[in-house]
Image: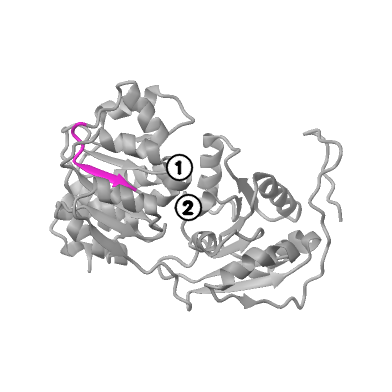
Amino acid sequence: MKFSELKIDQRILKALHEMRFIEMTAIQEKTIPPGLAGKDVIGEAMTGSGKTAAFGTPLIHGTSKGGGIQALVVLPTRELANQVGNELKKFSKYVGLNTAIVYGGVGYEQQIMQIRQAEIVVGTPGRLLDHMRQGALRLGKVKILVLDEADRMLDMGFIDDIKQIISQTPQNRQTMLFSATMPDEIVRIARRYMREPVRITTERHISKHLLKHIYYDVRRDEKLSLLSHLIEKEKPSLAIVFTATRRAADFVDRYLKSENIESMAIHGGHTQGARERILEGFHRGKIHVLVATDVAARGLDIKNVSHVFNYDIPKNALDYTHRIGRTARFGKTGKAISLLCNEDHGPFRNIIRYISIEKGHLEDFKAKPVHMQRDRDQSHHAPRRWHR
């Protein structure tokens, strides 16, 4: 189905067309018609499936200029709030709607000014509640409520915040809830706060012909040099390297830079401004390897990633699926490459019970053992030496 077949405001269609939204993805085709009809919707879909347009189209169509805050979108992370908010601004630019984007880590005043002019508010639970407590944000006119990445918000401990936010919206609102998985607590929220929702499920696994899964057995002290070797060999256009901890992300990033690979680490230890600058550079191709903790697996909408490297193996198949969901999107091919040392085989066995992963062979790899430790001199100005 094409967007042009929808019976919606032509100004919305014009904006969608300019953004090259021509044919709908599966989640869009199944979600938009009941959304336009005012029905509650539960959508099970992964990040990158086109959810923003799926809920954004009926949300903008049902919102009027100058009518106060009529639509609220709640998301788990600052990055996702920024991305979704900016997408909605583009979708609605010819309609003239104002979108306020609110999240923590930045000042209140500018956000309050945006809220006063807004018809749509997009934000994270904690900062939304802050504005509500201060009286800057009132939800009495909300007609459409969207809860996106609901299971991620549950994982991050936001469930009570979400309930409190919902309690301040009108009971006759339309609610759309999106989640990659449906834990019991999310099901209970749906039953309590939604009215006869239409349940939509899309294919959550990437087609085998688009995504290739490979793993390599390697010694722990050879992981870094193998990662560098594979990046040079694969020549990814854009790649994400996943690590288990912030410290590991910083360490891997420093090593790749020492090998003249354009990389940058991103994790929760960076300020919001720094994270935005890093992501902007990655989106523009200035950085072609992003070294990340799992904050990037679910909370970021990153396009055109050709390779995902699991430097540290995720704990289970679901986390693995979230990570590799960054590549092979919108019909493009991709590779997911995992590096296994002895301690990784336990969690990896849990993953291969559900996902078929091919073993890779190292024919031209010359190992350069590197131990993951730092020099005794911890000074920021001291040169770092790699322990090979």
Rendered location of residue 5, percent (x, y): 16, 64
- The residue drawn where x is 85% and y is 47% is 385
The quarter holding residue 314 reads: bottom right
Task: Identify the element where label 2 is drawn.
Answer: helix
Q: Does residue 225 show up magenta in the picture?
A: no
Above or below residue 45? Residue 193 is above
Would residue 388 be found to the left or right of residue 119 on screen? right
Name which residue type carries label 1.
Thr
**Magenta-colored span:** 140-147
Cα separation, mark 1 vs mark 2, equals 9 Å
Rendered location of residue 343, percent (x, y): 73, 62
Rendered location of residue 249, percent (x, y): 66, 49
> Circle 1 is placed at which residue position?
77
- The residue drawn where x is 29% and y is 54% is 53
Depth order, front residue of 266/132 = 132
Would residue 5 be found to the left or right of residue 99 on screen? left
Count residues near mark 1 (Cα–Cα under 10 Å), then give few for <14, some for 14-19, many for 20+: many
Quarter of the figure that contains the N terminus: bottom left
Q: Earlier in the sequence, mark 1 or mark 2?
A: 1
Q: Does residue 145 show up magenta in the picture?
A: yes
Depth order, front residue of 101/316 = 316
> Circle 2 is placed at which residue position?
298
Count residues near mark 2 (Cα–Cα under 10 Å), then give few for <14, some for 14-19, many for 20+: many
The quarter holding residue 342 reads: bottom right
